[in-house]
Image (cartoon, rainbow, N blue to C red):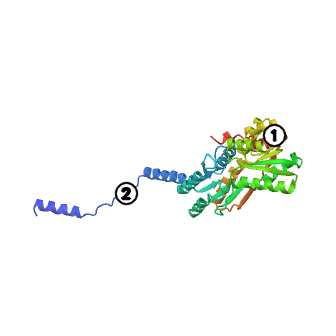
Amino acid sequence: MSPRSAANETAGRSSMAPRRRQTFRFPWRVFVLLMAGAAVLGACRSSHKKVIAVIPKGTIHIFWQSIQAGALAAGHDWNVEVVWNGPAEETDYSRQIQIMDSMITRRVDAIAVSASDRIALNGALDRAAAAGIPVAVFDSGVDSTNYVTFLATNNYQAGEMAARELGQLLHGKGKVAMLMHLPGSGSTMEREKAFDDVMTKEFPGIQVVARQFGMSDRAKAMAAAENILTAHPDLDGLFGSSEANSVGAAQAFKGRGLAGKIRLVGFDYSDGLLADLRSGTIDALVVQDPFRIGYEAVKTLVDKLNGRTPPKRVDLSARVITKADLEKPEVKELLFRDLGKYLH
């Protein structure tokens, strides 16, 4: 065999020899980084907050600002995101429906709404139900039953309180008027009906001689009060069924030099109304706890999202506040809560 043949034979044998299998080794640094990333992603998913939209009738008056503060406080306490959005004016029904529909389209987890009108919002409530979004109605009721719970001050009872307070101030005799809030507003309609009912049943010596709407506007309420005072110069008392009506009536009384001469029972509170209560322009205020209304509306929806079944109706009590009550600790806590702590 030639040297070249021998070399070729040797090369052939070596090429036929079994090769050593190579083992792939996964880089441990890459593995650690991937696991850390998965942990961060899982934490982000688990910390995702539920979103609850809160839609008031309006946003101008301190009553709604107090509800907003309560809703935000509940959002903080129960680890949910509260989205606050509502029309500026309580008469803007179409804007409230637009906001409601936008929240449904956004697919928020739940909605709390105070209906500007008992009927106007029913279609939006149906759409929310069809989308599987639970709704809590607060403050003012609706004709629909497509909601989880209705939470509000017992407004009929509050109207009874106002009538009895004014009836007692007048010793059961005289002529009174009522500044009404807004046609179709469920909460104030209940107060106004209760006022009429109590005057008819319990104070037959008192005649309700005038009723006018203030249209949720202080200037319009003042003009309505002026009209009543012009038509009835012998008026003995007046009930304002909302904050705007109470402010308008007080301004009309002061403008005519009638402060303290005609009995005035108002509803809700603000810095100006409390000043008028201290001065004697207003004899009494029937007040709600709007902070609690906002808080409980959100808390009810948190319960629903966590699998609990809230009651269909939750009634909260109002109370009558007079000048003598202003120094009571529980009244101070109710009326002088620091809203800025929540509205930042």
- Counting from the top left corner in percent of width and height, residue 246 is at 74, 43
Task: Identify the secondary structure beneath mark 1.
Answer: loop
- Dot 2 amino acid type: Phe
Viewer-side residue, 78 vs 223: 223
Residue 102, visible in the rendered structure: yes
Can you say whether 271 is above or below 73 in the image?
above
Q: Residue at x 89, y 47 (%)?
A: 171
Q: Residue at x 67, y 39 (%)?
A: 340
- Residue in view at x 85 percent, y 51 percent: 206
Disc nearer the start of the sequence (1/2): 2
For this view, does 253 lie left or right of residue 21? Answer: right
Depth order, front residue of 251/268: 251
Q: Amino acid at mark 1?
A: Leu
Q: Tell which tag, 1 or 2, sits nearer the viewer.
A: 1
Per the rendering, the mark at residue 24 is: 2
Query: Where in the figure is residue 25, as x and y percent of width and height?
Result: 39, 55
> What count of labels does the image hold?
2
Q: Which residue is mark 1?
A: 326
- Tell me how far mark 1 sits from mark 2, CA to CA: 80 Å
Horizontal placement of 219 versus 209: left or right?
left
* As drawn, 246 above or below 101: above
Could you tell me which secondary element the residue under label 2 belongs to? loop
Q: Quarter of the image holding residue 8? A: bottom left
Q: Are marks 1 and 2 in contact (CB under 8 Å)?
A: no
| Closer to the camera in the image, 333 or 236 | 236
x and y percentages locating residue 332 in the rendered image: 78, 41
Residue 286 shows in this picture: no
